[in-house]
Image (cartoon, rainbow, N blue to C red):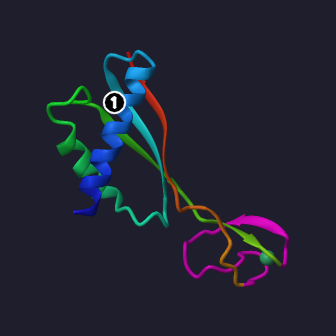
Amino acid sequence: MHELSIAQNLVELVIEAAENTGMKRVHSVYLKLGVLSGVAREALEFSFDVVIQGTPLEGAKLVIEDVPVKVFCPACQEAHVLPEPFPMRCPVCGTRTSQVLEGLEMELFSLKGV
Ligand SMILES: [Zn+2]
């Protein structure tokens, strides 16, 4: 399963980040997940709970914030957030665009713990 290896990498990253900041116990892991990242949110949450067993992260909660797709419209010369990932058109003028600015990322952005 794709999400299992993503969860493993994430957990390694979190453990390293916690060590670097002197955090002994991580309670919550905050992750930004683009709707176009290709990662299934529920599968990732499930995998995270499995992977943290027996690690310093055991019992931690994964909090995922969905990042909507933001595109740059060449006609408006502006960035717009799309209400739905597809079709990829400017929501204001309808011009097709493939310049995705946000929505592809998976980013660890915060940890809470003691
Ligand atoms: Zn436009």
The residue identified by callout 1 is 15
Residue 77 position in % (x across, y down): 85, 70
Across and down, in percent, residue 97 comes to 69, 79
Spot occupied by residue 85 in the image (x, y as percentages of width and height): 55, 72
- Residue appearing at x 21%, y 63% in the figure: 1
Of residues 37 and 21, the one nearer the viewer is 21
Tally of marks? 1
The stretch of residues the image draws in magenta is 75-95
Please identify the quarter of the rendering in which residue 73 is found. bottom right
- Is residue 22 positioned above or below 37 on the image? above
Residue at screen point 14% across, 31% down:
54
Q: Amino acid at mark 1?
A: Ile
- Report if residue 73 lies within the magenta region: no
Residue located 20% across and 43% down the image: 51
The quarter of the picture where the C terminus appears is top left
**Does residue 39 appear left or right of residue 88 in this picture?**
left
Residue at 53%, 62% in the rendered image? 104
Question: Dominant secondary structure of the magenta stretch?
Answer: loop
Secondary structure category for the residue under label 1: helix
Mark 1 nearby-residue class (10 Å; few <14, some 14–19, many ≥20): some
Q: Is residue 17 above or below residue 47?
A: above
**x, y (%) of residue 49?**
22, 42
Question: In the figure, is residue 91 to the left or right of 108?
Answer: right
The answer to which image quadrant residue 48 occupies is top left
Q: Residue furthest left?
A: 54
Ligand 1 picture quarter: bottom right
Q: Locate residue 6 relative to residue 81 in the image: left or right.
A: left
